[in-house]
């Protein structure tokens, strides 16, 4: 036999033996760690029951406290929740090395900061309010599209339909979860920021006041949300933008009113503060999924901002009480 071939075969046999030894060593080590874990936690059933009881109690009282805080001091609750939503997921992703989220977060915050600064200028350019409303309405639409796409991707993946697109299941679920998370996360942030900036804009323009009469008188042909003239009357056919009239009789541009209602979560007239039914605005069937999405986003705010903090506080409580 060729000496080189014999040497190569011997080398391969040696590598195979080493690989088998490493595999068996890893199996033994894994089994040993698993056994140590069971020995360490043997007889801790009552301790684990106490930990679960503390977790349930803390979640209940935290949710109760947050609900009371939201009802009595909504503005402070909204501000603290917004800070939590912006910082908690960012901190988790940065510490785990998920830099794609950090890069998207920085880009979104940079663009949104420019838009919000424009909305707080004094005096405010006439084109700014419509720019702000369209931007946040666009954020809402895009986040809704991402959320629905991610949801259906996960649904199709569970049914095994990903093979129709020639994509393996792991990649399919990974993309679906990313789209679902990004859609929900930026949908929540966009709604909260839109709620803040819309109040400031209408106050700066003078057509809105928290108390008393607004500083400006609203003309019948002027939109109180952007201060620009209405191009068409209600019900008039147009290819640009429709005009909407609410129950109090005041009229607004379509995109301005949808930004005020769907994204900003408002159901009162910005001028006279009379409450109206938001369902009158959602005449198109494709508007209703965005309304439903907005209701779910309010629930996700709790999961994104407060749930990680509650679980972290529970971990500290377990440590102080000596629970493992």
Image: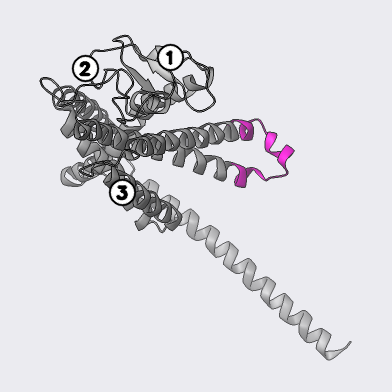
Label 1 crowd (10 A; few <14 / some 14-19 / many >=20)? some
Query: In which quadrant of the rendered view does residue 249 lie?
Result: top left
Q: Earlier in the sequence, mark 3 or mark 2?
A: 3
Quadrant containing the N terminus is: bottom right
Q: Residue placed farthest to the right in the image? A: 1
Q: Position of residue 283 (x, y in %)?
A: 48, 14
Label 2 crowd (10 A; few <14 / some 14-19 / many >=20)? some
Whole-number angstrom distance, CA of label 3 to CA of label 2: 28 Å
Local SS, label 3: helix
Whole-number angstrom distance, CA of label 1 to CA of label 3: 34 Å
**Residue under the point 61% across and 47% down:** 171
Q: Is residue 294 magenta?
A: no
Q: Position of residue 50 (x, y in %)?
A: 24, 32
Q: Earlier in the sequence, mark 2 or mark 1?
A: 1
Residue position for label 1: 234
**Residue under the point 21% across and 26% down:** 207
Disc 1 or disc 3, which is closer to the eye? 1
Q: Which residues are magenta?
A: 155-172
Q: Earlier in the sequence, mark 1 or mark 3?
A: 3
Local SS, label 1: loop
Residue 138 visible in the current orientation? yes
Residue position for label 3: 113
Q: Name the disc covering residue 273, or none.
A: 2
């Amino acid at each position: 036999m060729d000496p080189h071939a014999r040497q190569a075969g011997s080398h391969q046999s040696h590598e195979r033996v080493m690989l088998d030894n490493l595999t068996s060593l890893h199996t033994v080590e894994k089994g040993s760690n698993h056994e140590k874990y069971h020995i360490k936690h043997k007889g801790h059933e009552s301790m684990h029951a106490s930990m679960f009881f503390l977790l349930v109690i803390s979640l209940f009282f935290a949710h109760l406290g947050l609900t009371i805080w939201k009802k009595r001091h909504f503005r402070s609750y909204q501000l603290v929740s917004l800070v939590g939503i912006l910082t908690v997921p960012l901190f988790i992703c940065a510490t785990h090395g998920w830099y794609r989220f950090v890069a998207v977060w920085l880009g979104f915050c940079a663009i949104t900061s420019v838009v919000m600064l424009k909305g707080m200028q004094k005096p405010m350019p006439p084109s700014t309010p419509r720019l702000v409303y369209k931007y946040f309405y666009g954020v809402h639409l895009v986040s809704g599209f991402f959320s629905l796409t991610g949801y259906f991707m996960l649904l199709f993946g569970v049914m095994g339909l990903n093979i129709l697109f020639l994509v393996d299941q792991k990649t399919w679920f990974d993309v679906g979860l990313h789209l679902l998370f990004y859609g929900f996360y930026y949908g929540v942030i966009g709604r909260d920021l839109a709620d803040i900036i819309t109040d400031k804009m209408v106050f700066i323009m003078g057509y809105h006041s928290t108390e008393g009469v607004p500083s400006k008188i609203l003309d019948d042909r002027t939109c109180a949300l952007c201060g620009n003239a209405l191009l068409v009357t209600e019900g008039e056919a147009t290819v640009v933008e429709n005009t909407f009239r609410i129950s109090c009789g005041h009229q607004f541009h379509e995109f301005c009113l949808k930004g005020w209602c769907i994204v900003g979560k408002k159901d009162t007239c910005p001028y006279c503060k009379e409450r109206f039914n938001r369902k009158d605005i959602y005449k198109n069937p494709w508007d209703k999924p965005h309304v439903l999405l907005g209701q779910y986003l309010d629930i996700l705010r709790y999961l994104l901002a407060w749930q990680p903090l509650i679980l972290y506080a529970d971990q500290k409580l377990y440590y102080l009480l000596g629970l493992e």
